[in-house]
Amino acid sequence: MGEITSTLPSDIHGHWLFLYVKRTHSLPPVFYLDLWPFNYQYCLISDPVIAEQVQTRPKHPVLSDFLVNLTGKRNLVVLEGEQWKMWRARFNPGFAQGHLMSLVGVIMEETGLFCDVLERHAGEGNVFRLERALTALTVDVIGRVTL
């Protein structure tokens, strides 16, 4: 792991690390990664067809351990079984194709403003944190589509 991490940017997201481990060692689409004693053992799946087949399995406690400070103990990501089905059904209308298509105009407007920010920075030759601009875009889109 140290060899791989030493070649990556220091602020890279942890999910990318798993991809680099897979590529570096030519691993199959499903593999185990044991990070003991520093972290959990992981079964990593990089194939969406395989991932879809196992998505109903019990969720790992690391999800709730990680999210509890952000969302509390009960949230859609960590719920399972009948509770998950009930709450997911309540959210389904918001993800219906017809509803999402009605939001395209608003999303395009916000994306246009985001592109203006990128063009301004490029025109001025600025180095800036793209993460901040993308976070602002995300918040702006969510704010517009939910209000």
Image (spheres, helix red, strand yellow):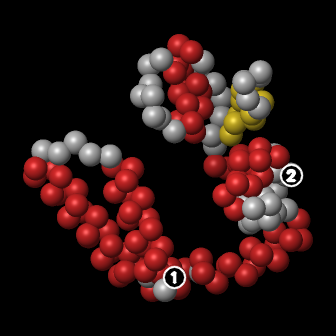
Query: Badge 1, how many Cα within 10 Å: few under 14, some, many 20+?
Result: few
Determine whether the residue tagged by mark 2 lies in a helix, strand or loop. Answer: loop
**Mark 2–mark 1 CB contact (< 8 Å):** no
Q: Between residue 59 and residue 100, name the one nearer to us.
A: 59
Comes first in the chain, label 2 or label 1: 2
Q: Where 100 sits versus 13, above or below?
A: below
Q: Quadrant of residue 82?
A: bottom right
Q: Amino acid at mark 1?
A: Thr
Q: Amino acid at mark 2?
A: Pro
Residue 73 pos. (x, y %) = 80, 60
Q: Where 10 sits versus 83, above or below?
A: above
Residue 11 pos. (x, y %) = 45, 34
Identify the residue shown where x is 78% and y is 30%. Answer: 41
User: Looking at the image, which residue sits at the far left?
Assistant: 123
Q: Can see residue 53?
A: no
Query: Badge 2, how many Cα within 10 Å: few under 14, some, many 20+?
Result: few
Residue 6 pos. (x, y %) = 48, 17
- The answer to whether 109 appears left or right of 83 in the picture is left
Identify the residue shown where x is 82% and y is 72%. Answer: 85
Determine which of the numbered discs, if any, sits on residue 146 in the image: 1
Mark-to-mark CA distance, 2 and 1: 31 Å
Q: Where 20 sits versus 120, above or below?
A: above
User: Looking at the image, which residue sits at the far front?
Assistant: 69
Determine whether the residue tagged by mark 1 lies in a helix, strand or loop. Answer: helix
Q: Can see residue 131?
A: yes
Front label number (2 vs 1): 1
Identify the residue shown where x is 37% and y is 80%. Answer: 106
So how many labels did they put on this image?
2
Report which residue position mark 2 lands on.
58
Q: Quadrant of the N terminus?
A: top right
Identify the residue shown where x is 77% and y is 52%. Answer: 64
